[in-house]
Amino acid sequence: MAEAKMSRNQSLLDSLTVKGYRVTSQRRILIETIQAAREHLDAATLLKLATQRDPRINRATVYRTLNLLKKLQLMDELDLMHLEGEKHFYEVKPDCQHMHLACCSCGAISEFSSETFERLKDEIAEQTGFEIQVTRLEVGGNCRACSLNAKLSASPARGKTARR
């Protein structure tokens, strides 16, 4: 049986309760931390943020909670461009599929959605008869800020004459 998708307004906590899972105080803190995050979290960052609220939370609890959320298809695990080694990031299962843009300079990760991406998926399905359930696309490069910094660093200093 397929798992019901979580609506935008339904929290992970509600989803766990509906599915019959106990929400302990530590699990609650971890989930609230995940949902409050404005960026993709790795397990170490999640642990660091959560222990600021409850120092008793340990690494095993973080991984057990992440594994449960993945098993229930409420969260995705991402291995984006192998930034900083074998680092995995986690995000709440999105309502719509999107691409991840990973900056190879600063490690920033942003999301991008496009009608063109949706049309490409439709075209693939139509031409191949493949029923697409999940799509993962990641693009590596330099974010706007790193690209601008690189250009500024490469340009000659203002007011100085080039030597020959």
Image: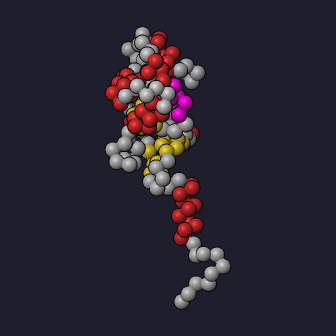
Residue 157 place in picture, x, y as percent: 60, 75
Give the number of callouts.
Answer: 0
113 left or right, relative to 3: right
Image quarter (top left, top right, bottom left or bottom right) of the C terminus: bottom right
Specify the farthest residue to the front: 55
Closer-to-camera residue (115/46): 46
Residue 154 place in picture, x, y as percent: 53, 70
Residue 38 place in picture, x, y as percent: 55, 36
Residue 150, compared with residue 123, is above or below; it is below
Taking the spot 58% from the left edge, 84% from the top edge, the residue there is: 162
Image quarter (top left, top right, bottom left or bottom right) of the N terminus: top left
Residue 22 lies in magenta, yes or no?
A: no
Taking the spot 37% from the left edge, 22% from the top edge, the residue there is: 68
Q: Which secondary structure type mostly characterizes the magenta part of the structure?
A: helix
Residue 152, compared with residue 162, is above or below; it is above
Is residue 119 something one can see in this rendering?
no
Taking the spot 49% from the left edge, 45% from the top edge, the residue there is: 109
Give the quarter of the image for residue 64: top left
Residue 120 place in picture, x, y as percent: 48, 40
66 left or right, relative to 29: left
Specify the farthest residue to the right: 159
For the record, the magenta segment spans 30-37
Closer-to-camera residue (67/30): 30
Taking the spot 34% from the left edge, 48% from the top edge, the residue there is: 85
Is residue 143 something one can see in this rendering?
yes
128 left or right, relative to 144: left
